[in-house]
Amino acid sequence: MPFECSQCGECCSHLGLVHTIREEYGDFRYLVNNEYTGEKTTVTVDPDKILLFDDRSIFAERPEACPFFRYDRNGAKGYCTVHLTRPEICRDYGCWRILILDPEGKRAGRVMCQRFLATEDEQLRQIFDEQINHIAEPDDAAWDERLIRILAEAGYIVQM
């Protein structure tokens, strides 16, 4: 299944912990620091997103959001306001490593990064917390196999 971004904003909702603005150059140009790697990137707000960027109301709801992430006026879609010049980590991001579907084939959750579960499915959350999250398997492939087996037994469909 090829990845299609739904612009939900989950990926950017906590990137304010990673990306910090180190310097403002003017003309909507900024120096951004990756707090984990120390990588610095100069970004510029996309010309068609300047008005969106000026609206900082998102931070009341999502205080850890990336400093360049915004929702449209009705809050339906999220936008990277520096998409054209975004940092490399954002360019490489694939949204999910493992996709989890419920028995009807609807998205129930995703394993993001290495072993982080993003879900609103309470049953999936419970299974993950009770049977998967504590697995101390250093090998990612072996961990993935155990996750797939546990979720398949519970009726979920797993795609990688």
Image (tube, rainbow, N blue to C red):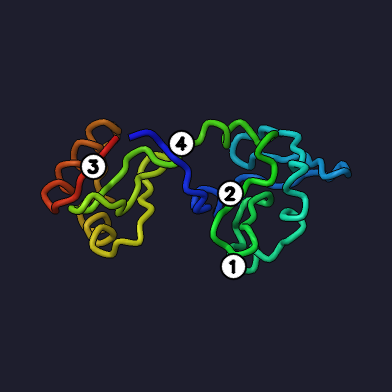
Q: Give the mark nearest the N terminus, 4 or 3.
A: 4
Nearer the viewer's eye, disc 3 or disc 2? 3
Which kind of residue does numbered mark 3 sit on? Val
Q: Which residue is drawn at 26% across and 54% down?
A: 128
Callout 1 amino acid: Glu
Which of marks 2 and 1 precedes in the sequence? 2
> Which residue position is annotated with label 4?
94
Residue 158 is tagged as 3
Question: How far apart are the alpha carbons under marks 1 and 2?
Answer: 14 Å
State left or right for residue 156 relative to residue 76: left
Give how far across and how far down residue 19 sits, in percent.
65, 45
- Asked whether, in this view, residue 16 is left or right of residue 158, the answer is right
Q: Are marks 2 and 4 in contact (CB under 8 Å)?
A: no
Q: Answer yes or no: do the residues labelled 3 and 1 have beta carbons within 8 Å? A: no
Number of residues whose C-alpha sits closer than 10 Å to that of mark 4, classed few (under 14), some (14–19) or many (20 or more): few
How far, Cα to Cα, is label 3 from label 2?
A: 26 Å
Q: Which of marks 3 and 2 is nearer the N terminus?
A: 2
Q: Residue at x 57, y 32 (%)?
A: 91
